Amino acid sequence: MKAAVLYERRTPLVIDDLDLASPGAGEVEVRLVASGVCHSDLHHIQRDTPTILPVVLGHEGAGIVTAVGPNVTRVAPGDHVIIAFGPKCGECYYCVRGMPYLCTPARPARPRLFKNGQVINQFLEVATYAERTVVSEKNVVKIRDDAPLAVCSLVACGVTTGIGAVINTARVEPGSNVVVIGTGGVGLNVVQGARLAGAARIIAVDVRDNKLEFARAMGATHLINAAREDVVERVRALTGGYGADYAFEVIGNPATINQAYESIRKGGTAVVVGVADENAELTIKPVWLMRQAKTLMGCAYGSARPQVDFPRIVDLYMEGRIKLDELITRRFGLDEINEAFRAMEAGEVARGVIDLA
Ligand code: COD
Ligand code: ZN
Ligand code: ZN
């Protein structure tokens, strides 16, 4: 089975032939149809993160169940599924409280990928830059089979993270003024989440004009190029001098997190969606938290419950209420995966998708 393996950081992924375990108890095998290219995958190539190498990256995948192990009840061969990344044990402190995005399982998943007997790790327990994968049945979400699977792969991360940040995490009210800083693959979905929530002004901020044009297509009402304009000043000018009700930071950079915090009005909410460097630190004047009664929130995986949210998001797409096709700028073969990362880094694409079937 072919997969893209990261053997060494800051080197290209290697398309390699790997052995995949048969699904054990509670596990399913999925033939992947497509996997989106998310910036978080690139972080693990470029940065020193806790992820152990060698690893097959990819966490935005969808496909068709091809085999199930003993005691699998949620899905059967032939089912169309979107794969939810990260552990989803269903039993830990967080899972039982409805926060599977914070799942802290008692045991890690067993190794399922091998090269000549050597274990190859599965990124976030899913490893979707591969022709097939074996995952826990708790990581697959069955969806309607009339929805195009390749497009639905984006629901596994970017779409759910972005829309979820607005709907689940911040619970933006209709009529709100919303700022989105960083309109890449995830940020564009914060933009369309804000539109879905009925936001009045949706102010998109990026350093690239092509990204801002993507944001306009997803529903942004105002565009700010941070390379040329003062973001905080423009946001204030667009919101009657007050600042926005909500600001979402979708880059993972302390400077833009500060910008989000400064862009909100008194009593407003800034939501950090971006993943910062492991060692990055943030400086905020605590006196503002009190005097200006501002809220600074974190958000993991759009605070989503994939078993509930994925089918809902797919329905919204099938009813024409959200856009997914427009997010995909370019498609690549698995053997073009390093080119897909280059295109993302160069800012050429909204989302790139790896076709696997
Ligand atoms: N000001 C404005 N815009 C900027 C700046 C800046 N200083 N620097 C970069 N940008 C823009 C870029 O031009 C680009 O358009 C955008 O920010 C980043 O977009 P992408 O497409 O490169 O990255 P995404 O959208 O795929 O990834 C977004 C995160 C980097 C936030 C990513 O880490 C993420 O998905 N976080 C979600 C948190 C989460 O739950 N992660 C779990 C797995 S993803
Ligand atoms: Zn992601
Ligand atoms: Zn759990």
Image: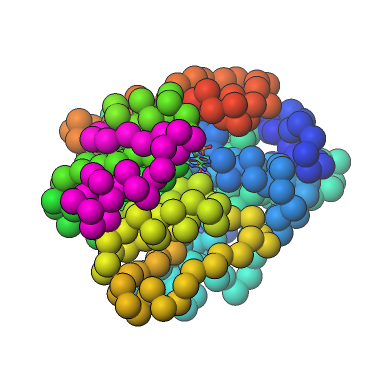
Color encoding of the figure = rainbow
Report the label total: 0
Vertical relation: 286 (above or below) 296: below
Vertical relation: 121 (above or below) 153: below
Which residue is pictured at 64% across the width and 40% down the height? 42
Work out whether residue 12 or residue 109 is closer to the camera in this orientation and state it. Answer: 12
Q: Is residue 356 left or right of residue 116?
A: left
Chain part drawn in magenta:
219-244
From the top left corner, tell me how far across and down residue 202 is, in percent.
25, 42
Task: Say whether residue 220 is magenta.
Answer: yes
Give residue 333's quadrant in the image.
top right
Which residue is pictured at 36% across the width and 36% down the height? 224
Task: Say whether residue 273 is magenta.
Answer: no
From the top left corner, tell me how far across and down residue 154 is, in percent.
43, 37
Q: Is residue 156 visible?
A: no
From the top left corner, tell me how far across and down residue 251 is, in percent.
51, 47
Which residue is pictured at 41% across the width and 78% down the height? 287
Q: Is residue 227 left or right of residue 108?
A: left
Vertical relation: 292 (above or below) 16: below
